[in-house]
């Protein structure tokens, strides 16, 4: 067993071996893995409370790994625990986003019903129709990019799908927005006459 002050230099597998016997080893173990859990989450846009929930889910994944690890199967503990942590986080994120979509969909319907106003509904319908006409007046490439953008895809995703650069996507979107703005202005001027 390594001296207590050198736990920071031992491997995860060695540290796992002394985990049950030494509280300092246990503290070092959880410190290391909390850092890993946070690094798994760095690519996700989460508010602080959501991030903290996901960190807890990752630590539950670590706890599961500790309870179920069997070194007889030939895996290193670090490999096994990383898989357990990732799976726990991915499952939690998946459930969270599915739940979030249901809540958001429910709110939208409730808000629309609560705010239903025939005059505003008519204006919205006219605006929607004029916007559809405006989009139809764009070039085929502009239409594709605007539709992808309205589906909340990133410039990078759009660029990859259309085999063009992100900068070109940005330029085309700026041009399309300008065209749509002019189209909507002229449409409303015609409606006012």
Image (cartoon, rainbow, N blue to C red):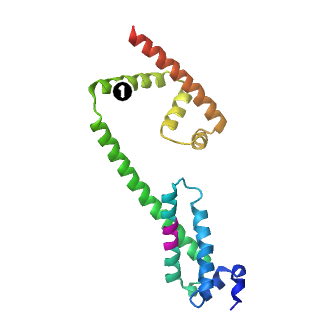
Quarter the C terminus occupies? top left
Question: With respect to residue 44, does 125 lie above or below?
Answer: above
What secondary structure do most residues of the magenta stretch adopt?
helix
Q: Nearer the viewer, residue 132 or 13?
A: 13
Question: With respect to residue 84, does 153 lie above or below?
Answer: above
- Residue 43, percent across and down? 59, 56
Q: Is residue 164 in sight in this rendering?
A: no
**Which residue is located at x 51 percent, y 54 percent?**
47
Question: With respect to residue 14, does 103 lie above or below?
Answer: above
The crowding category of the residue bearing disc 1, from other C-alpha atoms within 10 Å (few below 14, some 14 to 19, many at least 20), is: few
Q: Is residue 19 in sight in this rendering?
A: yes
- Asked where in the image residue 14 lies, by quadrant, the reply is bottom right
81 magenta-colored: no
- Residue 159, percent across and down? 61, 40
Number of dots carrying numbers: 1
**Which residue is located at x 54 percent, y 33 percent?**
145
Can you identify the residue that label 1 sits on? 124
Which region is colored magenta? Answer: 55-60
Question: With respect to residue 70, does 30 lie above or below?
Answer: above
- Asked where in the image residue 95 lies, by quadrant, the reply is bottom left
**Which residue is located at x 56 percent, y 23 percent?**
178
57 magenta-colored: yes
- Residue 41, percent across and down? 56, 61
Q: Is residue 96 left or right of residue 21?
A: left
Q: Nearer the viewer, residue 72 or 110?
A: 110
Quarter the N terminus occupies? bottom right
Q: Is residue 104 left or right of residue 151?
A: left
**Which residue is located at x 43 percent, y 25 percent?**
132
- Residue 96, percent across and down? 43, 58
């Amino acid at each position: 067993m390594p001296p207590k002050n050198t736990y920071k230099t031992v491997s995860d597998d060695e540290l796992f071996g002394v985990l049950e016997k030494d509280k300092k080893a246990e503290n070092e173990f959880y410190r290391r893995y909390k850092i890993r859990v946070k690094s798994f989450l760095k690519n996700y846009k989460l508010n602080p409370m959501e991030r903290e929930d996901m960190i807890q889910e990752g630590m539950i994944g670590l706890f599961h790994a500790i309870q179920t690890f069997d070194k007889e199967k030939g895996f290193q503990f670090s490999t096994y625990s990383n898989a357990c942590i990732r799976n726990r986080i991915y499952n939690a994120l998946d459930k969270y986003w599915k739940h979030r979509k249901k809540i958001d969909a429910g709110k939208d319907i409730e808000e629309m019903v609560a705010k239903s106003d025939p005059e505003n509904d008519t204006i919205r319908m006219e605006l929607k129709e004029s916007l559809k006409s405006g989009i139809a007046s764009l070039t085929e490439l502009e239409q594709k990019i605007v539709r992808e953008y309205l589906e909340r895809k990133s410039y990078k995703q759009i660029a990859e799908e259309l085999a063009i650069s992100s900068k070109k996507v940005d330029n085309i979107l700026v041009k399309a927005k300008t065209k749509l703005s002019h189209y909507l202005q002229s449409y409303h001027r015609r409606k006012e006459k």
